[in-house]
Amino acid sequence: MDRMERMQKILQTGMAAGGLENNGQDPEFQKITQRFLYGDVAHHVTLSDAQRALIVLVALTTCQTWPAIEKYTQAALAAEAAPEEIKEALIQCTPYIGMEKVQCALEEVNRVFEAKGIQLPLADQATVTEQTRLEKGLEVQRRIFGKENIDAMRAFAPEELKHIQAYLSAYCFGDFYTRKTLDLKMRELITFCAICCLGGCEAQAKAHAAGNVSVGNTRDTGDHAMPTFHWIPSRAQCHCLYRSGYPAINTEEYKKRCLCRVSLFF
């Protein structure tokens, strides 16, 4: 099967609803992009259609490409992604890309859900309480990155930055990673993809590349996720990040990471 045949096959599926549509005004652009996306890229992605649609929504949200959110939400539903999966994929991005970006994306998603008669709000997905969010977040954090690494980061944290560790454990991991619907492997893959789309967060990307491996995602999983977000200027850099190990941490680098994480909260 050549790439033209592969493209036609993809265009006949629900995923085509999220593609670059031929508006009749820029036919050459549409021809080039559709053949590349559906004839070349999709052929090398082994994620399910639903997973691929979720990763695309994560990339679109991170890059603030709001007009395409509606199309890919429809594509995700057509690929049999549950409404809860769609929302959880976006909510998972919150600590890394910022609350307002996710809020804007959720509003676009909600419009699609309402048009399709999906009742809102969806069922609650939280599994932690105010009393357990720190403890449960630490459990997840240690599972992903190793107890020794996490305990060392907390122990070596300067006094004026110890509260950042509480934010990291309770907020990033307690409030988000413990939620229902998406498993740990998918949540960690989503986090890695969002961070790569941000750019300039190489230290965090390296850490979450190692985190993906620790939760059972293979290097192939990361490699196959990369072509999905075709908005990234340097996919080669993302491949390198995914294939690198967990970096050694010194005090100065630690401070920089903490300050970077705080800036991503808002």
Image (cartoon, rainbow, N blue to C red):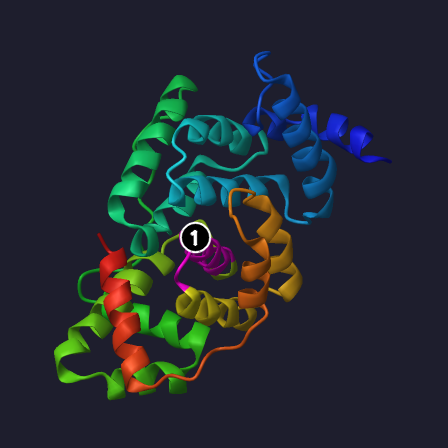
Question: Regarding mark 1 in the picture, which secondary structure is present there?
Answer: helix
Magenta span includes 69: no
Vertical side of 87 occupied by 93: above or below:
below
Vertical side of 157 occupied by 74: above or below:
above
Magenta span includes 191: yes
What residue appears at the point 46 percent right and 44 percent down from the top-left corner? 59
**Left or right of residue 139, residue 170 in this image:** left
Q: How many marks?
A: 1
Kind of residue at disc 1: Ala
Which of the 4 quarters of the picture holds residue 78? Answer: top right
Residue 178 in sight from this viewpoint: no
Can you say which quadrant of the picture contains the N terminus? top right
Vertical side of 220 occupied by 203: above or below:
below
Image coordinates of residue 74 in percent, x first then y, are 50, 27
What residue appears at the point 51 percent right and 47 percent down from the top-left corner? 232
The front one of 5 and 136 is 5
Image coordinates of residue 43 in percent, x first then y, are 73, 42
What residue occupies the far right of the structure in this picture?
1
Q: Around disc 1, counting alpha carbons within 10 Å, would you say few (fewer than 14), some (14 to 19), or many (20 or more)?
A: many
Q: Which residue is mark 1?
A: 194
Image coordinates of residue 224 in percent, x first then y, are 64, 53
Which of the 4 quarters of the picture holds residue 174? Answer: bottom left
Dominant SS in magenta = helix
What residue appears at the point 51 percent right and 60 percent down from the top-left corner? 185
What residue appears at the point 40 percent right and 20 percent down from the top-left corner? 117
The residues colored magenta run 186-201
